[in-house]
């Protein structure tokens, strides 16, 4: 298949669904760990067309959503300082911190700018030598290479007015934490194709071997997801636990060596807090000591800031797949894309935003959120 429409062919989709219904004999539960995949599943109604009892569990695959609340508060504390230009991607600006968001802070006079790549932030630092330019660097392994290259480039240029507030997270430790939870219901994973395009899938091999759980590397279009679900279901039905690659047009086992090298030069693995999930050991990236001068958290001494989630937001349960957006008492009323209480309602990859855009109706209407 060469063209985008072919990945959305309704006849091929029907054939895959028919084969899935013929294959599944049990109510399997499969988790996708990618917010883009979640949006496709919900927007296309794929999650509602599965065999009876079969369920897609929407995992912590939205990088904006898992960025800790205190990271946002730290970014706003930095942005409020005179002489600072704070930059990030557009979907970060409306994610609520404990009191406000970056967009509101900009309306009150802070110099907060949207950039399309971290290199844009480096260029701003070059163009404004009298200003401090800070890039809010979030995301999974997918965005880490570009952020690494920005730091490496700024270092080569000797820029003293550029820094990063880093909140990178890694997928495999989150999968392991979910599998080791006593409440785990996940029986197979769809792995994010773009993460694996960078990292390959060797990191998943120990997870498969230890937990006997199938992992299928999957793309983002409707046919990608239907085929990935079918491949995972076949493994479950056969009693197999293997890594399979549905996204063969973009992913190889070893991934992208040049991208991995850049990440390894700029970053090192560290413990990381995940919004709504908690602290996960060795689940994030931080700048290496030799690049400490580019660490905005150290430069502006904001590491000590800690924040509490909105009491009505059940983002933690949603990000781990334990709850659905429609379980929340605030969903679609006190929490909407225009006035969000939590990150999953803001991001283009958030599960709450996906449900709201698809018109999914809340299943609860009163009583306190838990």
Image: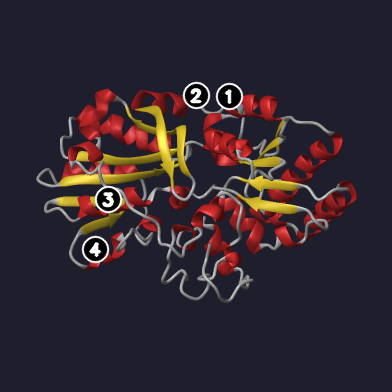
Mark 1 vs mark 3, CA separation in Å: 35 Å
Percent position of residue 148, x then y: 36, 33
Whichever of labels 4 and 1 marks the residue nearer the N terminus, that label is 4
Question: Which residue is disc 3 drawn over?
Answer: 75
Circle nearer the viewer, 4 or 1:
4
Whichever of labels 3 and 2 marks the residue nearer the N terminus, that label is 3
- Taking the spot 78% from the left edge, 57% from the top edge, the residue there is 50
Q: Is residue 115 visible?
A: no
Q: Residues within 10 Å of mark 2 (few under 14, many from 20)?
A: few
Q: Are marks 3 and 2 in contact (CB under 8 Å)?
A: no
Percent position of residue 121, x then y: 27, 45
Question: Which residue is disc 1 drawn over?
Answer: 254
Whichever of labels 4 and 3 marks the residue nearer the N terminus, that label is 3
Question: Which residue is disc 4 drawn over?
Answer: 106
Disc 4, SS: helix
Label disc, if present, on residue 257 of the rendered structure: 2
Please name whichever residue, 314 or 63, is drawn nearer the observer in this view of the structure. Answer: 314
């Amino acid at each position: 298949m060469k063209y985008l429409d072919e990945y959305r062919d309704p006849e091929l989709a029907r054939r895959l669904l028919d084969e899935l219904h013929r294959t599944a004999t049990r109510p399997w539960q499969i988790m996708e760990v990618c917010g883009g995949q979640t949006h496709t599943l919900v927007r296309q109604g794929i999650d509602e067309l599965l065999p009876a009892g079969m369920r897609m569990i929407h995992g912590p695959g939205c990088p904006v959503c898992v960025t800790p609340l205190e990271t946002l508060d730290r970014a706003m504390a930095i942005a409020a300082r005179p002489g600072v230009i704070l930059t990030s991607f557009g979907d970060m600006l409306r994610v609520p911190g404990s009191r406000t968001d970056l967009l509101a802070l900009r309306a009150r006079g802070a110099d907060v700018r949207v950039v399309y790549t971290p290199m844009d932030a480096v260029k701003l630092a070059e163009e404004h030598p009298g200003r401090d330019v800070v890039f809010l660097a979030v995301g999974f392994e997918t965005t880490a290479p570009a952020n690494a290259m920005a730091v490496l480039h700024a270092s080569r240029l000797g820029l003293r007015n550029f820094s990063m507030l880093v909140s990178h997270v890694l997928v495999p430790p989150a999968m392991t934490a979910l599998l080791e939870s006593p409440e785990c219901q996940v029986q197979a994973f769809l792995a994010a194709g773009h993460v694996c395009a960078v990292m390959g899938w060797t990191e998943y091999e120990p997870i498969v071997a230890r937990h006997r759980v199938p992992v299928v590397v999957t793309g983002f279009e409707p046919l990608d997801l239907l085929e990935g679900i079918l491949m995972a279901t076949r493994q479950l039905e056969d009693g197999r636990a293997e890594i399979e690659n549905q996204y063969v047009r973009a992913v190889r086992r070893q991934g992208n060596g040049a991208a991995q090298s850049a990440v390894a030069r700029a970053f090192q693995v560290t413990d990381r807090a995940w919004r709504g999930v908690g602290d996960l050991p060795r689940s994030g990236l931080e700048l290496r000591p030799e690049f400490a001068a580019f660490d905005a958290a150290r430069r502006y001494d904001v590491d000590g800031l800690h924040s509490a989630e909105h009491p009505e937001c059940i983002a933690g349960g949603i990000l781990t797949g334990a709850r659905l957006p429609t379980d929340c008492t605030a969903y679609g009323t006190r929490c909407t894309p225009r006035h969000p209480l939590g990150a999953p309602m803001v991001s283009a990859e958030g599960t709450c935003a996906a449900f709201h855009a698809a018109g999914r109706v809340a299943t609860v209407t009163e009583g306190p959120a838990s």
